[in-house]
Amino acid sequence: MVSEQEKTGKLSVWATYQYGVGEFGFTFFMSLVSYYLLFFMTDIARIPLETAGTLYALLQWVEAFTAIGAGMLIDNLHLRGGRYRPWLLSGSIVCLVGSVLFFTKFPISTLSTTVLFTVFYCVAYAGFNCMWIAYRALIGIIGKTSRQTVSLTISGTQLATVSSLLYSYLGVKMLSAFERPETGYTVSALVYGIIMVLSMLVVFRLAKPYDQDQTRPEIRQQKAAEKVTLRDMLRALPPLIPYGLSYVLSIGASTLIMSCLVYYFNYTLERPELMSVMITVMTVMRLAATFIVPWLAGKLDKKHIYLLSVSAATFFIVLAYLLRANIPVFFLLMGLYFFSLVPAGAMFMPCVTDATDYNEFERGIKARSFLYSVSSTFSYIAQFIGASAASAGLILIGYNAEKITQSPAAQQGIAVVTFLGTALLTALSLIPMLFYKLDAKTMSGVYLKKNLAAEQEYPVEKSE
């Protein structure tokens, strides 16, 4: 089977958006976790705030090590369906089952609830990590040039934004559609998990011409000589470190604000229905921003796009805090904040792909899945930082989950943690990116070598 890209040298828009369907699928699940996990733990499962905050932070480290293990496993395991494709389906199914179980409140003691939640959460994210790393690694296999990897990333971002828009209409309604509040969480996890599995099936079919059966003798012999050692993994890290540190801080800021917004609308404004409006504003502005990324990519390199994007986001989130009393202006500024973050976020996968290609074709280090697993680990470290900041902030300001109405000091404190805490982490993320070295000149030579080696590295069966 020969892909259209092999025939024409171009990656079709249709193929690009087929890849993006995967991100459309798992964004529903990620939205539920991002906005409502901590709230589920404290206000639905009734895990004490101190325990929930500590547990949530510690689980990020479990996820991080699971991601590294998944990357090592994928790099060194040879499967009949391909190196990456089998993990798309198996990982998404495991994530579906685990997430339904950890978003279920069982009629048991608080201690037992905490233990079961932890076990099922770890199971869900073991599956998610395998799926996510395989999905991301396919960017560098399907995309043969920098422009193609950016196109694949943007298609995923756009379809993820569409799913976020749908979530903004359906998410809150589904959570509140049942007599028992906890039922909404279980049903939501089931519905979003099924969507994730079906979406990964689309990517599974798309990737077949690119990701060959690893048990074929000629490929197995070639890949057996490419075992990724611990030394290779450590040597592969330096090109990715500057962007990785910036990403950790910026995503930590996003985790902080997404964890705290529900508290802000519920307890500070006492208007929980505005959470749905916020998600809609965020989603629409993110979608609009995706259309300027290709234009920016043609004008600036990844480093300068990131610095410009994050600087603007920092400015708008501070302004939103200062003018939050005016609700329409507040929503406008928050929309501009989310709009500004998109170009920086869109550089993440292209930067990771640049690092994997630079290592492979310039330094002879083949650790593709490992570096994508490291990028996933960066996400979990970021979530740890953001979740720790959110839970510590709520504790410091005197938030009490047992109270329907919070004290004036706590209400004001929630606003400070939500917006100024986010601004601080966002601004700090600018510093590491100043040291990023994989510029356009460096990568042009790398992509030339990649294209010359593509037929040997990823052989494609010829049609009769």
Image (tube, helix red, strand yellow):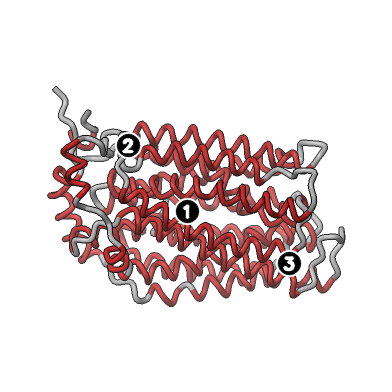
Above or below for 164 versus 63? above
The label on residue 289 is 1
Q: Nearer the viewer, mark 3 or mark 2?
A: 3
Q: Amino acid at mark 2?
A: Ala
Q: Nearer the viewer, mark 1 or mark 2?
A: 2
Above or below for 86 versus 308? above
**Whole-percent x and y of residue 77?**
32, 46
Q: Amino acid at mark 3?
A: Glu
Res. 169 in view: no
Res. 331 in view: yes
Above or below for 273 versus 330? above
Horizontally, residue 183 falls left or right of residue 148, namely: right
The local crowd at label 2, few if under 14, some if 14 to 19, many if 20 or more residues have their Cα within 10 Å, is many
Q: Residue drawn at (27%, 57%), measured in percent from left and top?
A: 228
Gap between marks 1 and 2 measured at Cα: 28 Å
Q: Nearer the viewer, residue 370 or 357?
A: 370
Are the two marked residues, 3 and 1, in contact with CB atoms closer than 8 angstroms?
no
**Whole-percent x and y of residue 347?**
39, 59
Above or below for 200 versus 444? above
**Whole-percent x and y of residue 184?**
73, 40
Q: Judging from the image, what secondary structure is the residue with disc 3 in? A: helix
Horizontally, residue 203 falls left or right of residue 420, namely: left
Q: Judging from the image, what secondary structure is the residue with disc 1 in? A: helix
Q: Which residue in the protein does label 2 denote?
A: 207
Gap between marks 3 and 2 measured at Cα: 44 Å
Q: Nearer the viewer, mark 3 or mark 1?
A: 3
Q: Which residue in the protein does label 3 denote?
A: 50
Quarter of the image where the N terminus is located: top left
Q: Residue drawn at (56%, 39%), measured in percent from left and top?
A: 96
Between disc 3 and disc 2, whose residue precedes?
Answer: 3
**Whole-percent x and y of residue 220?**
21, 41
Gap between marks 3 and 1 measured at Cα: 38 Å
